[in-house]
Image (spheres, rainbow, N blue to C red):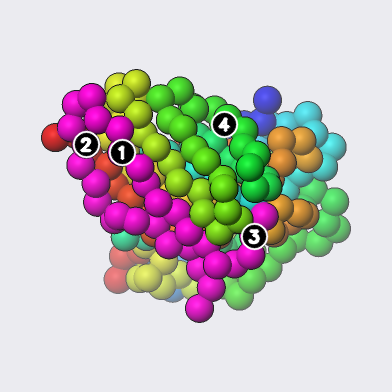
Amino acid sequence: DGGITQSPKYLFRKEGQNVTLSCEQNLNHDAMYWYRQDPGQGLRLIYYSQIVNDFQKGDIAEGYSVSREKKESFPLTVTSAQKNPTAFYLCASSPGTGGQPQHFGDGTRLSIL
Amino acid sequence: AQKITQTQPGMFVQEKEAVTLDCTYDTSDPSYGLFWYKQPSSGEMIFLIYQGSYDQQNATEGRYSLNFQKARKSANLVISASQLGDSAMYFCAMRGRFGAQKLVFGQGTRLTINP
């Protein structure tokens, strides 16, 4: 079955540590996205990528970094510069054209130790 | 800038009743799309329905329909014959012509279906 796989499901970060969240898709989608969701809130865009080796900042990119070396993969690194990283992180992908919806992974819940 | 407003933080409905979840939007793009997603307590986002700004008819998908009133900038989700499994968070989102396919989300509405 085609879909988006996020790992790990739960992640704990120590102070001053960088952590990387994985996102892999086998839907052959061109565009991929990372969102952050805080409790009781909607989703906010961190980064997005429309093609390989290219990505753009979203609304809350500070303290995060991404790469897009392969079409299937769009990992997100939460750096030590992100002072409030505790949140639910969702990865999505879309064909990149028209009214096609974004498909989401199951999310990674990041907490601070 | 694009903005989505969902004014109902929570709604409680009896099973088998119809329910309307409100969504208003603001954009200067002449071409845009509106989406509704469902988020159960497990966290995944499930796509429900899409409406394009130039679509002449309101979108329908099974028990879901979108009441699109362009002049009022509203895109309300209607769920007919609600079921216990409909209990979840519901998010309205908008994609504009500019800014690729990225979505702007509302704050969500928590729907609870009572037996």
Q: 10 Å neighbourhood of mark 2: few (<14), some, or many (≥20)?
A: some
Residue at mark 3: chain:
A
| Separation of residues labelled 4 and 1 (CA atoms) | 19 Å
| Separation of residues labelled 4 and 3 (CA atoms) | 19 Å
Residue at mark 4: chain:
A
Amino acid under disc 2: Arg
Residue at mark 1: chain:
A
Tell which circle, 3 or 2, labels the residue nearer the N-terminal end: 2
Question: Is A4 a magenta residue?
Answer: yes
- At mark 2, the secondary structure is strand
Q: Is residue B81 above or below residue A100?
A: below
- The numbered dot on residue A19 is 1
User: Disc 4 designates what residue?
Assistant: A58
Tell me whether marks 3 and 2 sit on the same chain: yes
Q: Can you see residue A77?
A: yes
| Separation of residues labelled 2 and 4 (CA atoms) | 23 Å
- At mark 4, the secondary structure is loop
The location of residue A32, given as percent across then percent down, is 58, 49
Q: Residue at left 69%, top 58%?
A: A95
User: Disc 2 designates what residue?
Assistant: A13
Q: Residue at left 61%, top 75%?
A: B62
| Magenta-tinted stretch | A1-30
| Separation of residues labelled 1 and 3 (CA atoms) | 25 Å
- At mark 3, the secondary structure is loop
| Separation of residues labelled 2 and 1 (CA atoms) | 7 Å
